[in-house]
Image (cartoon, helix red, strand yellow):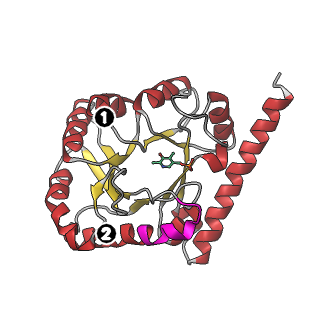
Amino acid sequence: MASFAQVDMDTSISRNYRAVLDRISISARKVGRAPNAVSLIVVTKGQPLDKIQAVIEAGAQLLGENYADEGAEKIQVLAGNRGLEWHMIGHIQSRKARLVCDFFNYVHSLDSLALAEKLDRLAGELRHKLPVLLECNVSGEESKYGFPAGQEESWEVLFGTFSSILHLPNLAVRGLMTMAPYTIDPETARPYFDRLRKLRDVLKGVFPQTDWSELSMGMSADFEVAVEEGATMVRVGEAILGPRPKRGG
Ligand SMILES: *Cc1c(COP(=O)(O)O)cnc(C)c1O
């Protein structure tokens, strides 16, 4: 039998999950978008399995992990749940590419041509097409991964690399991903989300054969602003599952 503490935790996670879905709907309607145009990816990195199971029971099927090893382990343990889709949202070290390809359904954090070529080769071996987003660093912060896209004047420099990625047969590029600089005030993230959408619109013009429909942007602190600016996927962790235990302690 579940303990009272367990029941309490399950209830609060379910409540948080539905509250975030409601806030997504409200933000979407505010700007005339359909609420179902936005997918909620629940970010489970650093969270214990009982919390992840609780959010799955609450209805979550799209889950995000940052680290290949931690993710692959959880994916196997939770494989009894039907219909889950696992999204890799963190930087991928080259030697972890195989693990990512073997276990994850979607990659948000494609940030170099070398990684793209490696994932393409591995996906080819598995005979499947891997959906990916190109991670772009639109803030110019040096600590961030992603293709450098802080200056609109230099977007053109990226086109050659992007063209090479778009030609890889076993990757399916679906759009762009970004992380805004960390902030208390979500409004400060708005210009970065706006810039990512603009870059996407430019890429649509340059590479019209590619499906650029997805924009993965917005986290616990700023997902409502991201939805207002056109996010089709938001990645929310702590607002649903509570604070993460500190990594590496
Ligand atoms: C951790 C993380 C998130 C979720 O952050 P929260 O603040 O817990 O919502 C989203 N995207 C990426 C890339 C992350 O690393």
Marks 2 and 1, how far apart in space? 26 Å
Q: Residue at x 25, y 38 (%)?
A: 119
Residue at the right extreme of this rendering: 4
Q: Using a 10 Å C-alpha cutoff, classify the residue at mark 1 as few (fewer than 14 neighbours), some (14 to 19) or many (20 or more).
A: few
Q: Residue at x 47, y 61 (%)?
A: 232
Q: Report the span colored magenta.
A: 183-192
Q: In this view, does 121 lie above or below 3?
A: below
Q: Nearer the viewer, residue 170 or 7?
A: 7
Most foreground residue, 157 or 103: 157
Q: Is residue 145 above or below residue 57?
A: below
The picture places residue 27, in percent across and down from the top left corner, at: 61, 70
Amino acid under disc 1: Gln
Q: Mark 1 points at which residue?
A: 93
| Left or right for 58, reference 123 | right
Q: Where is residue 227 in the image (x, y as percent from the top left)?
A: 53, 66
**Which percent across, then down, holds residue 246?**
57, 35
Residue located beneath label 2 in the image: 199
- In the rendered structure, are the residues bearing label 2 and label 1 in contact, judged by CB atoms less than 8 Å apart? no
- In screen coordinates, is 117 left or right of 137? left
Q: Nearer the viewer, mark 2 or mark 1?
A: 1
Instruction: Name which residue lies at 16% across and 55% down.
Output: 161
Q: Is residue 65 magenta?
A: no
Residue 208 falls in image quadrant: bottom left
- Foreground residue among 189 and 45: 189
Callout 2, which amino acid? Leu
Q: How crowded is mark 2: few (under 14 residues within 10 Å), some or many (20 or more)?
A: some
Residue 1 is situated, as x and y percent measured from the top left of the image, at 83, 21
